[in-house]
Amino acid sequence: MKWLEHRIPPPIVLLITAAMMWIIARTTYVAPLNQGIRYVTTAILFVIGVSVVLLAMFRFRRAGTTINPVEIERASSLVTSGIFQLTRNPMYLGLCIILTGVAVLLSAPWALLGLAIFVLFISRFQIQPEEGAMRTRFGNAYDEYCRRTRRWI
């Protein structure tokens, strides 16, 4: 399934996953969560997730490198500062936080399967190929970055 590597932009994967989570929520158990708590928690998770993504985008722009994960070979610099000191993949982490907010909004514990599928898909078809490309492009500097910074959190 190598043909899937870098083929589907992560925001599209996010939307497909959210739709899948919605379908799961409509066909499985829905937890009786207080509506106010659900909405506040969802809003907080959305704000955190979007903020993490934007912080990463800002760092990429500041470094003058591409933010397009489908064209990783265009990366012109290794970004290791800011949010990238905490996680090597803040954009994907932010998308996971957003999907967690979707699960809370749907109030469906089984919808969290969508989050697990998202993590597995992004890890295999986006992150692993990116890591190979970054290792080829930046060599020892990337390996050292990987030693001191975790892939997710």
Image: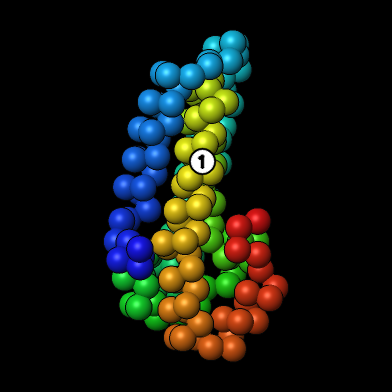
Q: Does residue 142 appear left or right of residue 6 in this picture?
A: right
Quick check: can you spot residue 131?
A: yes
Residue name at image x 48 percent, y 45 percent:
117
Q: Nearer the viewer, residue 36 or 130?
A: 130
Q: Nearer the viewer, residue 108 or 38?
A: 108
Q: Return the x and y of residue 94 as percentages of the image width and height.
A: 51, 48
Which residue ends up furthest to the bottom in the rendered image? 140
Residue name at image x 45 percent, y 53 percent:
121
Name the residue carrying label 1.
115
Q: Return the x and y of residue 24 as percentages of the image width and height.
A: 43, 26
Q: Return the x and y of residue 134 as percentages of the image width and height.
A: 47, 79
Which quadrant does the N terminus fall into? bottom left
Which residue ends up furthest to the right in the rendered image? 148
Number of numbered tags placed on the structure image:
1
Q: Return the x and y of residue 20 as percentages of the image width and height.
A: 38, 33
Which quadrant does the C terminus fall into? bottom right
Q: Is residue 153 above or below residue 109?
A: below
Q: Does residue 148 appear left or right of residue 33 in this picture?
A: right
> Label 1 crowding class (10 Å Cα cut-off): few <14, some 14-19, many 20+?
many
Which residue ends up furthest to the front in the rendered image? 1
Q: Is residue 89 above or below residue 147?
A: above
Q: Amino acid at mark 1?
A: Leu
Residue name at image x 47 percent, y 77 percent:
132
